[in-house]
Amino acid sequence: MQKLTATIVAYQNYSDIQKTIESIEKYTDKNISKKIYVVDNGVAVSDPDELSSFMDYIQKYDDVEYYDMGENTGFSKGHNYVLPYLDSTYHAIINPDILLEHDALGGIIHMH
């Protein structure tokens, strides 16, 4: 089985990220083992209710992990944070406003 990991860096945009996660979960080939890392650069300035709602939302997915950076470390550092945790064949850096409409990630994997 192919392994896919993906990182999404958050900064007060939890509703966008929920939609992104939903589209990844809906369209990615179920034969691909995947893990989605959400690295939060904005938790220190986020609305507590929005953050709480987001945390409740991601709990329904076994393949989503959340990391609180405690500060804004930047886009690149946020993505690089998960590198030591990766155990995958493929890794995708995903913007928080991306919505898949088909199995784009599986399509890339199956091309190789």
Image (cartoon, rainbow, N blue to C red):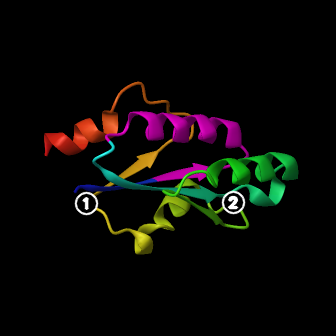
Of residue 45 and residue 55, the one placed in the foreground of this image is 55
**Residue 79 covered by magenta stretch:** no
Residue beneath disc 2:
72
Q: What secondary structure is the magenta-colored segment mainly?
A: helix
Residue 16, placed above or below residue 30: above
Q: Which residues are magenta?
A: 7-29
Q: Amino acid at mark 1?
A: Thr
In the image as oriented, which residue stretches furthest toward the top? 101
Mark 1 lies on a secondary structure that is loop
Looking at marks 1 and 2 on the same chain, the residue that comes earlier in the sequence is marked by 2
Taking the image as shown, residue 16 lies to the left or right of residue 8, namely right
In the image as oriented, which residue stretches furthest toward the left? 112
Q: Image quadrant of residue 26?
A: top left
Cα–Cα gap, marks 1 and 2: 29 Å
Residue 23 image position (x, y, % from top left)? 49, 34
Q: Image quadrant of residue 69?
A: bottom right
Residue 62 image position (x, y, % from top left)? 52, 58
**Residue 27 covered by magenta stretch:** yes
- Residue drawn at point x = 72 percent, y = 52 percent: 56
Residue 7 image position (x, y, % from top left)? 48, 54
- Residue drawn at point x = 33 percent, y = 44 percent: 30
- The label nearer to you, 1 versus 2, is 1
- Residue drawn at point x = 45 percent, y = 39 percent: 24
Residue 53, placed above or below residue 41: above
Q: Amino acid at mark 2?
A: Asn
Per the rendering, the mark at residue 89 is 1
Residue 37 image position (x, y, % from top left)? 51, 58
Of residue 15 and residue 40, the one placed in the foreground of this image is 15
Of residue 76 and residue 106, the one placed in the foreground of this image is 106
